[in-house]
Image: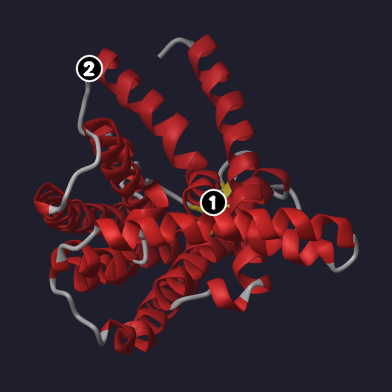
Amino acid sequence: MNQTVNDVLSYIVDVLLALSIVGSFCTVLTFMLFVKLRTYPIRLILYLCMAIFFAQFFFFISFKAYDTLFCLPSGLLLHYFFLADFIWTFCVAFNFYQMIVKRNRDAESFEKYYHMAAWGLPMIVIVFCAGFGKYQNRGGFCYLENELPVFLGFFVPGLLVVCANAVIFFFIAREIHDTLKNAPKTSDRKEKSKEFRVYFSIFVSIGLSWIFGFIMTFFNDDVFSTIFLVLFSVTTPLQGALIFISYCVNEKVFSHYIGLVSRVFPYCKRFETNTVGNTSTTQNSSTNTHTSSRSENLSSDSEISMKEYK
């Protein structure tokens, strides 16, 4: 690949990673601050954002600490949190499947198993790799020493998770499409926009943009490799920021922040009242409109309320 393209992509990735770190941090901060917003599905998003934040943070550190004593710990933590990131995306995808497709009202009972898998399985891999001394300075970057440990300790687990998430996404998307198709419609444009935003938020949450990176490795052709590298470089590093946009940029979150600020600046209280009033009106309108039980179940089960996208 042209060196200029590599340099440009490297700069873009750095910028997007910085945005993603900020976005994932703000998502965690938001749902830690406001308990009322921290529903069970949102808790899973919060844990995912923690993994994303630390994975991308140590990705930066591993380039800065390659010639220091922190090289080994940074490579180890980078590996750990990226594996945790993968597993949390699967947990989020599986939770969407349970709540939207299976209509499982007791999906919260799986949370303890998600924690054991997401934090425990990467630890086993890390201990195994560290025990055999597989972390080292790779010439300006701290990570696994050669291709075989990277393949077995990162590529294979990541590929399995992404493939599983893609299959789960298909069933979720089909269920959402069928539900919205059978629900009373207001306008085609609104329905399409609402449906797209639901798909987008799920796509981002379950990390499907990683599929571009894995597909890239199967092409020897420079053109196809470059296309998928570009797609991967402009989507995956931005995951934390996109999650923040999907889950935190809405009236409900704004009203909570306004309420928090109004404790110091009482004048802001009027904006909170207006926001809450608008949200209430929207919710009442949506309740009257969505008489379809399938649509109501979908809204409550997925915690991605259809009424928020109207």
Q: Which residue is mark 1?
A: 250
Residue 105: x and y, percent? Answer: 24, 83
Task: Give the secondary structure at mark 1.
Answer: loop
In the image: residue 9, left or right of residue 169: right
Query: Splitting the image into 4 quarters, where does residue 13 fall?
Result: top right
Query: Hey, what amino acid is under mark 1?
Result: Asn
Q: Nearer the viewer, mark 1 or mark 2?
A: 1
Residue 70 can be seen in this image: no
Q: Is residue 167 above or below residue 141?
A: below
Quadrant (top left, top right, bottom left, bottom right) of the C terminus: top left
Residue 306: x and y, percent? Answer: 32, 55
Q: Is residue 100 above or below residue 8?
A: below
Quadrant (top left, top right, bottom left, bottom right) of the N terminus: top left
Query: Hey, what amino acid is under mark 2?
Result: Asp
Q: Which residue is mark 2?
A: 221
Q: Is residue 167 above or below residue 2?
A: below
- The residue at 64%/64% (across/down) is 30
